[in-house]
Amino acid sequence: MVGDNIKKYREMLKYSQAYVAEELGISQNAYSKIENNQTKSFTLERLEKIAALFHINLGDLLGEEKAINVMHNHIGYGYVNQNQESSELVALLKEEIMSLREDKDRLLKIIERLTKEEDTE
């Protein structure tokens, strides 16, 4: 699973869980749950940050044998491997979509507020 790969690379680099968690801006406990495959709440963006921190590509982190580009553009890349259940990937991508929708809604509110401020000037 992904958490096992994350742990393997972290240990190869001799990084502590606390260090990686700090770099990701999360608690050490939350990071531990990622390594132990106890959470599905990490996003594609978080996986990309972990891969960058470990100086590897996302495909290496996910451990794919055959990488398929399933998403491109500002969202990033998702990979499928023969050992990874497609339902895991679908869940990961759904979480990323929800996160992007929330970001979009926040940005629209900011634009609306700024537009109103300009109109009152």
Image (cartoon, rainbow, N blue to C red):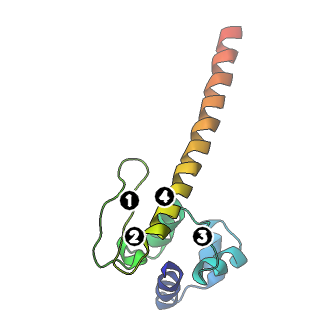
Q: Amino acid at mark 4?
A: Leu
Residue at the image position 54 percent from the left and 46 percent from the top: 100
Q: Which residue is mark 4?
A: 93
Q: Which residue is mark 2?
A: 58
In this rendering, is residue 102 above or below 57?
A: above
Q: Amino acid at mark 3?
A: Lys
Q: Residues within 10 Å of mark 2 (few under 14, many from 20)?
A: many
Q: Earlier in the sequence, mark 3 or mark 1?
A: 3
Q: Where residue 88 sits: x, y (%)?
A: 49, 69
Mark 1 → mark 2, Cα distance in angstroms: 8 Å
Q: Determine the image quadrant of residue 76.
A: bottom left
Mark seen at residue 102: none
Mark 3 → mark 4, Cα distance in angstroms: 11 Å
Q: Earlier in the sequence, mark 3 or mark 4?
A: 3
| 2 or 3: mark nearer the eye | 3
Q: Earlier in the sequence, mark 1 or mark 4?
A: 1
Mark 1 → mark 4, Cα distance in angstroms: 10 Å
Q: Which residue is mark 3?
A: 40
Residue at the image position 58 percent from the left and 50 percent from the top: 99
In this rendering, is residue 10 above or below 106?
A: below
Residue at the image position 55 percent from the left and 85 percent from the top: 15
Q: Nearer the viewer, residue 72 or 86?
A: 86
Mark 2 → mark 3, Cα distance in angstroms: 17 Å
Q: Determine the image quadrant of residue 61.
A: bottom left
Mark 1 and mark 4 residues within 8 Å of each other at the beta carbon: no
Look at the image and tell me in which quarter the C terminus lies: top right
Q: Secondary structure at mark 3?
A: loop
Q: Residues within 10 Å of mark 3 (few under 14, many from 20)?
A: few
Q: Which residue is mark 1?
A: 77
Q: Determine the image quadrant of residue 103.
A: top right
Q: Secondary structure at mark 1?
A: loop
